[in-house]
Every structure is written in C-alpha cells, then in structure tokens.
Amino acid sequence: MSSISPRYTLDLMESPVSIKSPAGVTDREAHDRFERSLDLFHIGVNFEEEGQPEKAIAFFSESIDANPNMSLALLRRGKLFLESGMYNEALADFFSYRNQQPQCPRVLLYLSRLSAVLYEETKDEFHKNNAARYLDWAVQKNLHYSMFRIDEN
C-alpha cells in the first residue's frame, strides 16, 4: 500500500491507477500530470469524507482532466453521482472505469446498485435483470480477482 495522506491509504492492487503516457506526451509530462491528478484526487477524497460531495465531484473531475487514466477518481466520482441521483453521469463513469480496469469487480457492484435504484424508480424488469446480472458477475470476478491477487504474492 502507498500512503498519500494521513487520512487516506491508496491500495494500488485494489483499485489500480495508471501513469501511462498519452500519445504525444513525454514521460516527464505524464509523471507531472499523474502527480497533479493524485493531489487533486486526495483533495476530492477529503471533501467526500467531510460530506461535501459537490466539491469532491469538482476535484475528482479536475483529477480526471489532469490524467484521464485516473480510474480511482472515476470510480469515486461515479459513486457520488449515483448517491446524488445523477444516474447518467454515474453510468458513464462506471463504464469508463470498467474500460480502464476490466479485472476489478468493485465497479460491477456499483453497476448492480445503480440498476437496483433504477428498478425501484421505474419498476422496469430490464433494470432488475441488470442488477442481478452485475451482482453475479461481481461475485464471479471477485473470486477470480482474489485468486489472481494471491498468485501475484
């Protein structure tokens, strides 16, 4: 684990982040963007913990702008969007996260939760089925992901 603040510990295996250089960006520029993105992410986490989701969302957005590969900020912002009833925004963040981190099952749990909320609001069986499907996938992936992590150690 890597500590980025006294209040927040970043488990890079649990929710990976990427320092990958976008096309046309030097490794040094990518590193600087990553550092800035991580600082902004940290500020967002502090606002989230203080119960200020609007400010947290703003800083998570800046973190993503600084480094589009900052999957942790996508996941945290998506969770806040979900909790704020901004379902389209949450869905976009969760799918972006899933594209960056296809092996991490946590996003499937959030997608299941989002589908369950939409089912409660609409009573549309499509959302009910999606909630169950995402939950099943999360359980299957979590078993595989846990085994993968054990093999790495």
Image (cartoon, grey):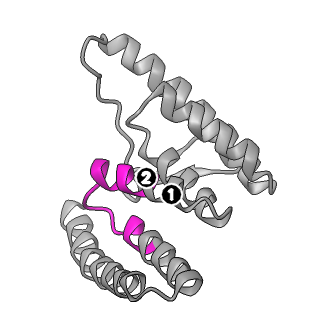
Task: Name the residue located 30 percent from the left edge and 85 percent from the top edge.
Answer: 136
In this rendering, the answer to whether 27 lies above or below 124 is above
* Residue 4 seen anywhere in this rendered image of the structure: yes
Q: Amino acid at mark 2?
A: Ala
* Residue 5 seen anywhere in this rendered image of the structure: no
- Pick the quarter of the image with the C terminus: bottom left
Residue 101 screen position, x and y as percent: 30, 53
Measured Cα–Cα span from mark 1 to mark 2: 6 Å
Question: Secondary structure under badge 2?
Answer: helix
| Occupied quadrant, residue 152 | bottom left
Residue 145 screen position, x and y as percent: 26, 69
In depth, the one of 145 and 123 nearer the eye is 123
Reply yes or no: does residue 100 show up in magenta. Answer: yes
Q: Amino acid at mark 1?
A: Asn
Residue 112 screen position, x and y as percent: 43, 77
Task: Name the residue located 28 percent from the left edge and 51 percent from the top edge.
Answer: 99
Task: Name the residue located 41 percent from the left edge and 81 percent from the top edge.
Answer: 127
Reply yes or no: does residue 119 show up in magenta. Answer: no
Q: Main secondary structure of the magenta part?
A: helix
Residue range of the region highlighted in magenta in the rendering? 93-109
Residue 117 screen position, x and y as percent: 55, 79
In depth, the one of 101 and 85 nearer the eye is 85
Specify few, some or many for label 1: CA neighbours under 10 Å numbering under 14, 14-19, or 20 or more. Answer: few
Q: Which residue is mark 1?
A: 88
Question: Secondary structure under badge 1?
Answer: helix
Assess whether mark 2 and mark 1 are in contact (beta carbons under 8 angstroms): yes
In this rendering, the answer to whether 93 lies above or below 28 is below
How many numbered badges does the structure rendering display? 2
Specify few, some or many for label 2: CA neighbours under 10 Å numbering under 14, 14-19, or 20 or more. Answer: some
Q: Which residue is mark 2?
A: 92
Is 34 left or right of 53, judged from the image as shown?
left
